[in-house]
Amino acid sequence: MSAVAALSPFELLAYYERLSLAHSAGTPERVEALGLWRGIGFRVGRHSFVSGIEEINELLAVPALTHVPGTQAWLMGVANVRGNLIPAIDLGRFLFNERTPSSERTRLLLVRQHGGTVGLLVDEVFGQRTIDDDQREGSEEETDPRLTRFVQGNLRLGEQRFGLFSMSRLVRAPDFRQAAL
């Protein structure tokens, strides 16, 4: 008979807890290698972007929205996310004045801003992307004037071009913070 089988139910639970804690303590879920940067890839219209994984708190299917009168067209409304009211911004409409069509791939990216969280509606999310320093240093400058204040460069990942999109620059932009008409 094994030593584990001889344990009482309480001792067995304590044993499993020790194993669980020992496993999680030494295996962080982050890329620890120097020179690597992790981001979340997403699409807005025809443009693909990647933002730092630390800038995006959560990805959600689009919840029900309540319209808020007297606001900019890009403020779609507010969503109740686990008891918190989150303003939902159509990022395509804010950036390009083009409404984001609703589809099964449409997602809401939750991003922290001063005073709370904001949801950004995007066409789709590609998932996590890992980028090395050489790729980031070799990025091309953004030329679209609608994007230059938010995109820190463009790089190629395979066949696809991604703009390095700064969520922190977006949420600090005066026109983004002024949703009232």
Image: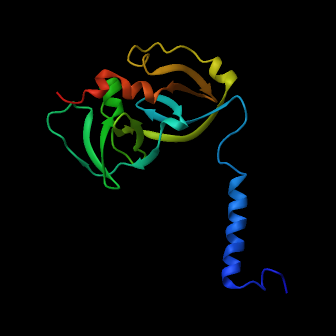
Q: Residue at x 42, y 49 (%)?
A: 60
Give the residue at the far right of this rendering.
1
Report if residue 176 is visible in the image. yes
Identified at 40% across, 31% down, the residue is 45
- Give the image location of residue 99, x and y in percent: 30, 33
Furthest residue toward left = 70
What is the quadrant of residue 67 in the picture? top left
Q: Is residue 57 left or right of residue 22?
A: left
Query: Quadrant location of residue 162?
Result: top right
Residue 159 location (% of width, % of height): 61, 28
In the figure, 70 relative to 18: above or below? above
The x and y percentages for residue 17 are 67, 69
Taking the spot 73% from the left edge, 52% from the top edge, the residue there is: 26
Rendered-image quadrant of the N terminus: bottom right
Colouring rule applied to residues: rainbow
Q: Nearer the viewer, residue 111 or 145?
A: 111
Relative to 27, is 160 on the left or the right?
left
Residue 41 visible to an observer of this rendering: no
Between 97 and 60, the one nearer to me in the picture: 60
Q: Position of residue 110 (x, y in %)?
A: 41, 42
133 horizontally vs 77: left or right: right
- Of residues 166 and 101, the one nearer the viewer is 166
